[in-house]
Amino acid sequence: MGVNQVSYRDFCEQPKNSNIRLSFPAVCFVWQIAMIILFGVFVRYNPESDAHWPEYRRMKNFTDLENDFYFRYPSFQDVHVMIFVGFGFLMTFLKRYSFGAVGFNFLIAAFGIQWALLMQGWFHSLDYNDGKIKIGVENLINADFCVAGCLIAYGAVLGKVSPVQLLVLTLFGVTLFAVEEFIIISVLHAKDAGGSMVIHAFGGYYGLSISWVLYRPNLGKSKHMNGSVYHSDVFAMIGTLFLWMFWPSFNSAICNHGDGQHRAAINTYLSLASTVLTTYAISSLWEKTGKLDMVHIQNSTLAGGVAVGTAAEFMLMPYGSLIVGFFCGLISTLGYIYFTPFLEKHLKIQDTCGIHNLHALPGALGGVVGAITAAAASTTVYGEEGFRGIFDFNRVAPVQGGYQAAALCVAIVFGIGGGIFVGCILKLPIWGDVADENCFDDEFYWEVRTCQISKYNCNLSN
Amino acid sequence: MGVNQVSYRDFCEQPKNSNIRLSFPAVCFVWQIAMIILFGVFVRYNPESDAHWPEYRRMKNFTDLENDFYFRYPSFQDVHVMIFVGFGFLMTFLKRYSFGAVGFNFLIAAFGIQWALLMQGWFHSLDYNDGKIKIGVENLINADFCVAGCLIAYGAVLGKVSPVQLLVLTLFGVTLFAVEEFIIISVLHAKDAGGSMVIHAFGGYYGLSISWVLYRPNLGKSKHMNGSVYHSDVFAMIGTLFLWMFWPSFNSAICNHGDGQHRAAINTYLSLASTVLTTYAISSLWEKTGKLDMVHIQNSTLAGGVAVGTAAEFMLMPYGSLIVGFFCGLISTLGYIYFTPFLEKHLKIQDTCGIHNLHALPGALGGVVGAITAAAASTTVYGEEGFRGIFDFNRVAPVQGGYQAAALCVAIVFGIGGGIFVGCILKLPIWGDVADENCFDDEFYWEVRTCQISKYNCNLSN
Amino acid sequence: MGVNQVSYRDFCEQPKNSNIRLSFPAVCFVWQIAMIILFGVFVRYNPESDAHWPEYRRMKNFTDLENDFYFRYPSFQDVHVMIFVGFGFLMTFLKRYSFGAVGFNFLIAAFGIQWALLMQGWFHSLDYNDGKIKIGVENLINADFCVAGCLIAYGAVLGKVSPVQLLVLTLFGVTLFAVEEFIIISVLHAKDAGGSMVIHAFGGYYGLSISWVLYRPNLGKSKHMNGSVYHSDVFAMIGTLFLWMFWPSFNSAICNHGDGQHRAAINTYLSLASTVLTTYAISSLWEKTGKLDMVHIQNSTLAGGVAVGTAAEFMLMPYGSLIVGFFCGLISTLGYIYFTPFLEKHLKIQDTCGIHNLHALPGALGGVVGAITAAAASTTVYGEEGFRGIFDFNRVAPVQGGYQAAALCVAIVFGIGGGIFVGCILKLPIWGDVADENCFDDEFYWEVRTCQISKYNCNLSN
C-alpha cells in the first residue's frame, strides 16, 4: 500500500497540460445526453405545473393564486440571481481571472442544477405511484441551493483548477449534498431553512478539503496574479451586493407560507445589517491608518446571512438576529486577517476566496445558533400551532436542539470526508489543470483578446 | 425607374456627417409631444388599475389579491430588467462602444414602449364603449416585449448607425410588430407565449434585412474597433446573465394564471441549463487548444430561452425542454463559428452582435418546435380543461400545428419585408450616421472624457 | 458671540488628518451595540411575521396569501436593490472614488436602516398595549425609504467627507426624516406614496445645506480627480438603470393594495419613459455637435420618477404622467447645464452628483404636482370608495391640496434647517476628513492595490 501511495503521488506529479479540447467537450456532451435520458425516464411536472391543474385545483378547492408558484417564484428569481450573478461576480475580484470566475460559475451552476433536480427529486419528490419525480418551483429553488454548495467550494480552488475538474467537483458535490441533505432533513428531521449547515458548512468544508488535497507548494510563482486591480474590485462588489440584498429571499425561499417566509426575511435583513457595521469596524481597526480593505467588505459583510440561515424561520427575535450578525462580522473579518494566512502556512490549505471565513465557519456557527434556538423554543413563544408548524416532528425542544447539533456534525463530516475523496480523484493528472506558475490567469482556458489599437493607446479602457 | 434607382443610390452615397444636433432633439421632442397628445386622447386605466377598483372587485367578487398586478408584476420587473440591463449590457462588449450600447438601448426602449402601448392598445385593449385604450400591467409587459424586437434589430447594426436612425428603426419596428402580432395572435390564433416567432424571429430578420440594405463595403476600416477588451467582456456578462436568469419570467410573463406561468418557467429554466452545456462544449471543441470564446458564452447560452418561447406553456415535458436547449446551444455556437462569416462574405450582411445565431435562427426553430408540440397535443396529456385553456380556439391539434407554422411564416415575412423597407429609408444620407472608418466608436455621439491625470499615470483604471 | 463665531471658525480650520483608525471603529461598535440593546427592549415581530400567525389568520379569516408579505415583498426587494446597487453604483462615476461610492453607500444604508426601524417604529408601529414596536415587511420598506434620504444627501458631499462624517450625517438624517415624515403623514395627513417630498425634497435640501456649510474654497486642487473615466461611466449606468427600472416598485411599494399599487407602477413607468426622451434631446441640443453627455443620461433620466412620487397613487392619468416626465427631464438636464455651475459659483454649494437637479428640484416639483392633483380630485374620477380609500381623511379636495403644499414646505424647511445644523457639527475638525487637495480619491480611506505585474504591462485591464 505504501508502494501504491508513492506511485499515486508520482503519477500525480507529472507535468501539467492544460489542453482540454477533447476531455471538456466530451464530459459536457456525455453528461448532457445522460441528463436528457434520465429526465425522459424520470421527470414530470407536479400537479401545480401540469396542465391538469384546473381539475386539480377545483378538486382541492384552490384558487389559481394558491398555486405555489405565486408564493415562491419571486424568491426563486432572487435566489437565481444570487447563484449566477452573486457568486459569479463575487469571484471576479482577481485582476485576470474574471472570465473564469463568472464563466465557470455559470457552467458549474447550469450543469449542477440538472443533476440536483434528479438527485434531490429521487430523495424528496418521487411519486411512488408511477416512479416519476414531479417537479415544481420549489424543486428549482432547491436545485439552486444545491449548486450553491459547489460554488462555495469553487471559491477555495478559484484559479487553480481546470473546468473539467470543476465538473467533476460538481458531479460529486451535488451527489454528496443530496445524501447529506436527506439525512439532515428527512432522517434527523432537523430544520435548516437557509442552509447554514446543509449548504454553507458542507460546501465550505468540501472546498477546503479539496484544496488541502490539491495543495500546490509552488503557488507563490503565481503570486503576482493572485490579487485584484481597481476595476476588478468594483466588479466584485456587484456580486457582494446582489448576494447581500437577496439573502433574505435565500433564507425565506422554502420556509412555510405566511409567517415563516415573512419572519425569515426580517431576521436575515437584520442580521446582515449588523454584520456590515462590525466588518467595517474591524477592517478599519486592524489597519495602520484605519483604511478599509475591499477583501473584508466584499466577503465578511455576508457572514451574517450565512449564520442566520438555520434559525431564520425560528423566533430568533430581531435583537437575536442583530447579535448573530454582530459576532459573525467580527469573527469573519478576523478570520481573513489571521486565519487565512494560518490555514495556508500551517494547514497547507490554499483558500483563494477565503471561504472558510465566509461560509464554513459562519455556517457552523449558524448550526450552533439554530441548535440553541431550537432547544430554547417553547409553545409560549411560538403558540401551539406555530410550534407544530415549524418543528414538524413530535419532539420536545431540547431534543430537537440535540438533533440540530447532530445535523451540523453530519454536514461537516460529509464536507470533509467527501472533499478528501473528491480531492484525491481531482489530483490525477488527467484533468488538464495548469502548472503552478500559470494559476489565476484566464489565458489558459479563454481566448483573451490583446490590445491592438492604433488610434488610442492601450489606456483607452480609462 | 432605372434612373431613379441610380439617383437614389447616388443620393445615398454622399459624404457622411454625424452632426445630429438639430435632427435628433427635434425628433425626440416632436415624438414625445405627439405621445402626450395621443395618450391624452386614447389611454386610460383599466378596471384593475383605476380608482373604481373597490366597486369593480366587489361586483366581480374578487379579493385585492386577484388584481392581475399580483399575478404579473414580479414577472414584469424581471422582463424590464432584461430589456434595459440585459439587452443594454449584452452589447457593451465592444471596446469603445459601451456608451452607445447601453445608452442607445435605453433611448430606444423608452421611446418604443410608449408607441407600443398605443399600437398594441389599439389592436388588443381598445374599449369599444368609449374608444379608449385601457391599460394595466399586462400592457406594460407587452410593450416591453414589443421593444425587445427593435433591440434585437439594434444588435445587427450596433456601432454603424446614428441615434436618429435608431429612432426611425424603432418607430417602424414597433408598428410592424404590432400588426404582425395582431395577425399571429388574433387572426391566426397561434400561441406564442415567449415570442419565439413574434419577437425573436421577427426582430432578428428585421435587423438582418436592415443591415443588408445598409451594407458598408469599407467597414474593414473600423476593424480595429470591432472587438472587445478584457473589462468590456466582463460588462457584457452582466447582460448575458440577467437575460439568462430572467428568461423564465420572460416566457411565463403573459401565460395563463396558475399552471401556465408555472410550467413556462420550468421549461425555460431547463432549456437554458441545457444550452449552456452544449455552448461550452462546442466553443471549446472548435478551438485549437480547447479554449473558450467569450462571444459564444455571452450569446449562445441564451439561444435555448429563445427557442423554447413558443412552446413554453405547452406540455413540452422537462426532457423536451432539455432537448430543445441541447440543439440550440449547438446550432447557435456553430452559427457564430461558421455562419456569421458566411453571412458577411457571401450575403453582405454585417451582423455586429450575431443576432442571426442568437435570435433569428433560434426564434424560427422555436416556431417549429411550437408547431410540432401543438400538433402533437392531446386531451390525454393536457386534460379537457387544460387543452381548452391553452389553445383557446376550437381546433384539433394538427390544425393548430398548421396555424403555428403559418404564424412563423408571417413573422419572417414581416421581418424581412419590413427590414428592407425600413433599410431603404435609413439609407438616405440625412440621418447623421458616421463614415465607415468611424464605426464602433463612441466618440462621435458621446462626450468621451480623455485621461488627464497628473498624479497617476493613465493606468489607474487598473 | 462674534468672538465665539470666530473661534469656531478658527477651530474648524485646523489642518486635516484623515486617520480614522480609532474614531470610525468606535462609532460603529458603540452604535451597533446600542442598536442591539434598543432592539432588545423595543422591537418584536408583528402579527403577520410572528409564529402566532396561524391563530391570528384564522381569527381574522385570512388565507396565508393575505399575509402582507405577498403583497409587498417583491416591491421591497426592488427597493432594496435601488438603495444598495442603484444609489451605490450611480455614484461610481468618479474615476477614482468607486470604492467610496459603493462602499460608503453600503455602510450608510446598513447603519441607517436599523436606526430607521426604531425611529419610524416609535412614530408609526408602536403597540400601545406593551410598548413594543411590531415590525413586518412594510417597516423594512420604510426603513429603506428613510435611508434613501441620507444617500441622496451623500451625493452632494461625495468625495469630500470621511466615513465618520457620513455616519453622523446618517444618524441625524434618519432622525430628522422620521420627525418630518410623522408631521407630513400623520399630522398633516398629506399623501406621499413615492416620497417626492418626504424623501427627495428633504434629502436633497439636507445634502445641499450640509455641502454649503462644508464649502471648500480650494476644492479646485482636486479638480483632476473630479471627473469620470470610460469604465467608471459604464459602472454608473448600472446604478442608473437599476434605479430607473425599479422606480415603479419604489413609488408603489407602500400604496394601497390592489389598484393603488397597480396605478402607481403605471404612472411611474410612463413618467420615466417620457423623461428619457427630453433628457436625451436637451443633452444633445446644448452641445456643439449634438453629442450626448453621460452626466445627463445617468441622472436626469431619473427625474421623472422623483417628480411623480407624490401623485403616483392619484388618478394622474397616463398622459398626466407623461407630461410630468416631459418637463422634469427638461428642467433637470438644464439644471445640470446651468444651475450646478451657478450653485457652486454664486451660492458656494459644491454638489458633486448634482442632487439639486435629480432630487431636490424634481422632489419639490413632485410636491406641487401632488398638491394640484389632490386639489383637483373628485369622486367622479375616483369613485366614492376610491376617494375615501386614497385620501383617508375627511377633507374636500382643495383643502387636501393645501395640506399637500404645506407638507412640501415642511420637507424643505426640515431639509435646509437640519442640513445647516448638521453641517455645523460636521465642520468640527475631529471627523477625519481629507484636505482639499485629496478629495475624490479612494486612497485615503481604502487599501488600493497598485499594479505590480511582471508579465503584462499595466494595461492588462483592457
Image (spheres, coloured by chain):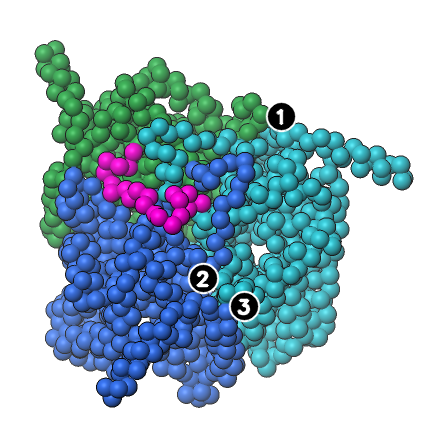
Chain colours: A green, B blue, C cyan
A352 relative position to A126: left or right = right
Q: Which of the two discs, 1 and 2, sits closer to the camera?
A: 2
Q: Residue at x 18, y 47 (%)?
A: B283
Residue C361 picture location, percent across and down: 65, 61
Give the Cα distance between marks 1 and 2: 49 Å
Give the crowd class for mark 2: few <14, some 14-19, many >=20 residues within 10 Å.
many
Mark 1: give few (<14), some (14-19) or many (20+) Cα within 10 Å: few
Q: Which of the 4 image quadrants contains residue A278?
A: top right
Q: Is residue A139 left or right of residue B147?
A: left
**Chain part drawn in magenta:** A441-462
Residue at the disc numbered 1: C22
Q: Residue furthest top?
A: A2
The reply to whether the C-beta atoms of the residues labelled 3 and 1 are less than 8 Å apart is: no
Say above or below: A432 vs C205. Answer: above
Instruction: Give the chain letter at badge 3.
Output: C
x and y, in percent, of residue B285 in the image:
14, 45
Which mark identifies residue B445? 2
Residue B91 seen from this side: yes
Closer-to-camera residue (C421/A218): A218
